[in-house]
Structure formats: structure tokens, C-alpha cells
Amino acid sequence: MRVRHTATAAAVTVATMAASAVVGIAAQADTKTPTNLGIREARQVIVLGEANRISGRLAARGQGAIAGATVELVKRAPSADDWTAVRDATTNEQGAVSFLVSPRQTMRFGLAFRGDATHFPTRSGVVTTDVVRRLPTAIGIRVNPHAIAPGGSAEIRGRLHLARRTRHPRPLPDQTLTLRQRNADDSWTTVATQQTDENGVVHFTVTPAQTSRYAIFFAPTDRFRASRSRGVTVSVDQPTNLSITTSVHSVDPGRSVTVGGVLTENGQPLADKTVELLGRPAHKRQPLTTLGTGTTASDGTVSFTTGPTVDTIYRLLFRHTDTDARSVSPAALVLVRRPTTLSIRLDGDTVRGTLF
């Protein structure tokens, strides 16, 4: 009985100690604060041999930054399964910490906080630093104007910068860019070369004899990859002329009028082209609106039938194509006669009337 009693007492004692331990752990857990750890990298892409900065900020929920805490930098190659500790650092008063890294290959990085007596452990997300032999580049391009008359000129502007995926698309000054013109067989002929200015910009002036396609090219260097812009087209339009006539200069209300014109190119009729009839009230300052469209005949003529209700100014418009320049006719005014009435009465031997 004593043995049994002793065993029973011991069991009770152990159970009591275990319960106390559980209560102690639970009490300790209740006093800890959840944490979060952010991470960012200064650059997403670096050249082999360059350094990148990985930084983060440790904070406690509802309490803000955690100063004086130890944060560990870990890394993992894309082909590896496990994380490797790199080194650790202590957070400053703002809870911030940073590491300078210079990986020899593309590497993933993360930050870890192991926790302490009052804070739970946490880990950051993952950033990837791409390590390349040369930085990727990109070229923006624009042309003004897009269409010129024979003998006219256009300006082509280009801008060389780091590709946006580097997260640092700064301009690249003092680099050589080449403007090329595409040939009929899809080969390219060099037109001019120029050094980029402090903003990575170049300006080329072109005077093509016919409609031409251009692009800007950048050759690779020890530090930067090659790139080329999209293509832009400079249209060389043949000059056109558009006349306008009206069947009458004034009409009664409700009557129609014919507006016609002739479209020519270098004095020759221009057939199968779309011409627009534009109009606006003569006594109102408002833009011309399109009232109709027509197609020129073999002799370049086009006509429209319209019924103005007020005095109206008309013009004809031909919008430019890849080969023909834009042209607008002179203005033509059609007056609309106002309706009248005439009253008559006999006043003795005199017949009198009133015109309204």
C-alpha cells in the first residue's frame, strides 16, 4: 500500500509539474508579440562583379520598429533546395537593416529574425538578383512629322536607357547610336551615327526622297547589351490640290444645293480617293463638322447634295495617305433666303402693300 501510495503521490507530483510547465509556456507565448520583416533590393539586375544592396525593416505588430534585433541574411541559388546563411546584422532605431552582396551568379535572398523573449520569429519574402555579363538596354523612338512633302525633312528622336526590368531605367549618356533605313529587301543601310547626350538622347534629321522606314540601333559594349528601337515610317506625300464649287450661291429654305470639287495630284486627277464634306453655320464660331463622305471619280471629281437650313460655309477635305499629302479646299458660302410674306390693301384709289 505504501508503495502504491508513493507511486500515486509521485504521479500526482509529475502531473502537477507538467501542468505548471504548460501553463508557463502558454503564459510566455501570451506575452510575445507577432512581427513582420520586409525586404527590398536596390537593383534587380547587376553586372558580374558589381554589388547590390539588400535591405529590410523589422517591426512588431502594434508597436512599430524593433531596434537592436539580430536579422540574418540567407541566400539560395535557383537550382538549390536549401537556404544558406550569409551573415547577420543589427537593426537600427528605425528597425532597418541592410547588407551589401556581390553574387557571382543569379541568387535569391531572404531575411530571417529568430525571435527573442518578447517577439515571435519571422521571415521576409524573397528577392532575386539577376547577375548578367551585360546590362539590358532599350531605345525609345519618335518622329515628327510623320508625313512630309517632297524635299521636306523630319526629325527622329531616340533615347537610350537601361531596360525597365533592371528596376533602374536610367538614361545612358555618351553612347553611340546608329540610325538605319530599311531597304526593299529588308536589309538596313546606315544613315548616321550620334553620341547620346546627358539624357541619353539623340536627334537625327532625315530628308527621304520617298516613304521610308527607320530604326535606331545600339551595338553591345563591355557593360551593356545591344538593342534596337521599333521602326518608324516617314511618309513622303505627293502634293495635292482640292477645289470647291456650289451649284448656287443662295437657295430657298428646304431646297438642296450641290457642292462639288476636283482633287488633283501634281496637276493630274486623283481617282478613288475619299473626300469629306465639312460645314458649319456661317454666323457661329464653331468647328467644321463632317456632313458626308464621297469618292473621287476617274477625273478626280466628287459631289455632294445637301440642304442647308441656315447660311452655311462649306469646305472639302482630303486626308493624307501613305503617298498623297493632305489638302483642304477654300471656303464656299451658301446663303439661305429668308421666307417672306406680302400683304395688300386698297386705300381709296391707292393700292398699298407691306412686305414682311
Image (cartoon, grey):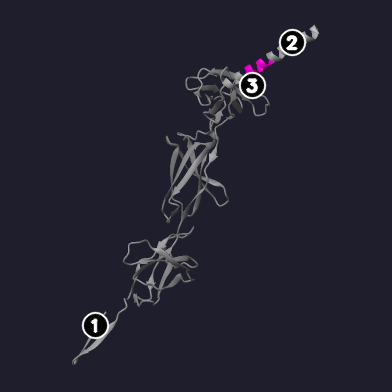
Per the model, the C-alpha gap separating discs 3 and 1 is 108 Å
Relative image position of residue 291 (x, y in whole percent) = 43, 67
Q: Main secondary structure of the magenta part?
A: helix
Q: Which quarter shows the C terminus? A: bottom left
The label shown at residue 354 is 1
- Sort mark 1 into few (<14), some (14-19) or many (20+) by Cα contacts within 10 Å: few
Q: Which residues are magenta?
A: 18-25
* Kind of residue at disc 3: Thr
Q: Quadrant of residue 128?
A: top right
Tell me the SS state at disc 3: strand
Report the amino acid beneath label 1. Thr
Write down the residue under mark 2: 9
Distance (Cα) linking label 2 and label 1:
134 Å
Say which label, 3 or 1, has the lower sequence index: 3
Q: Residue shown at 33%/62% (left/top)?
A: 285
Foreground: 326 or 345? 345
Looking at the picture, tell me which residue is in the foreground, 289 or 240: 289
**Is residue 75 among the parts visible in the rendering?**
yes
Nearer the observer, disc 2 or disc 1? 2
Q: Which of the two labelled residues, at mark 2 and mark 3, occupies the earlier sequence position?
A: 2
Residue 144 covered by magenta stretch:
no
Q: CA distance from mark 2 to mark 3?
A: 50 Å
Circle number at residue 84: 3
Vertical arrangement, residue 69 with respect to residue 150, above or below: above
